[in-house]
Amino acid sequence: MTIFHTDIIILAAGASTRLGQPKQLLPWQGVTLLQYAVKTALTVTTQPVVVTGANGEHLAAALDPGQVKLVFNPNWQQGIASSIHCGLQAMLNRTPEPDQVIFMVCDQPFVTSGLLLDLINERQKSRKPIVACAYAETLGIPALFDKSLFPQLLDLQGDTGAKRLIQQYGEEVASVEFPEGAYDIDTESQYKELIDKLPG
């Protein structure tokens, strides 16, 4: 059986304008949301790439540089495509190059190592070039992309994220159920609602 080399890119460059403070640094289960995403990613890969932009210095200071590859996106205001490009380019400069990449964000706090492994296992089983998460009647990230799609990912522009490719490839996309993916954090009330959902 082929074992695919999987890397992870955490997109964390946004300015959190609606929240009024960097969402990446909000407390979650004893750490920050970004630290929690890194911790989760480290269960399935070594040294995930973290793409920062707005508040880059503050985010970098909160991470262990030995655990992650920090990449600053100077064009973060141009939209998520620039962060995808930045992170992927940094990953392709490493040796060995990955066979596939998972993109994730830090404001989906219910992402687990089990979910990331489900994406990898579904890719192994289905052999489809994209495996995305299914929630809220859509497919989205976290999502895994085969290296054959890296050129298309690098070609994305502006606020067009990986979802464009997920929609474009239709039948070539496998999916993993992740109903909690519908929860994300853009406002203080959403954050408080999520905190209330935590046990204890």
Image (tube, rainbow, N blue to C red):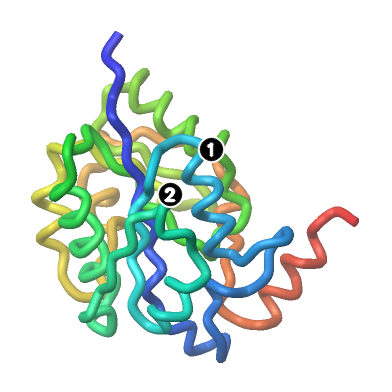
Q: Nearer the viewer, residue 44 or 14?
A: 44
**Residue at point 34%, 27% (across, down):** 123
**Residue at point 19%, 56% (across, down):** 90
Tell me: residue 125, above or below residue 24.
above
Residue with the mark numbered 1: 115
Q: Secondary structure at mark 1?
A: helix
**Quadrant location of the N terminus?**
top left
> Residue 34, position in %: x, y?
53, 64
Q: Amino acid at mark 2?
A: Pro
In the figure, is residue 19 to the left or right of 193?
left
Q: Secondary structure at mark 2?
A: strand
In whole angstroms, how far apart are the C-alphas of marks 1 and 2? 9 Å
Labels 1 & 2 near each other (Cβ < 8 A): yes
**Residue at point 40%, 77% (across, down):** 14
Q: Earlier in the sequence, mark 1 or mark 2?
A: 1
> Residue 79, position in %: x, y?
27, 77
Mark 2 closeness class: few <14, some 14–19, many ≥20 residues within 10 Å: many
Q: Amino acid at mark 1?
A: Leu
Tell me: residue 190, above or below residue 177.
below
Q: Nearer the viewer, residue 112 or 139?
A: 112
In the figure, is residue 43 to the left or right of 49?
right
Residue with the mark numbered 2: 142
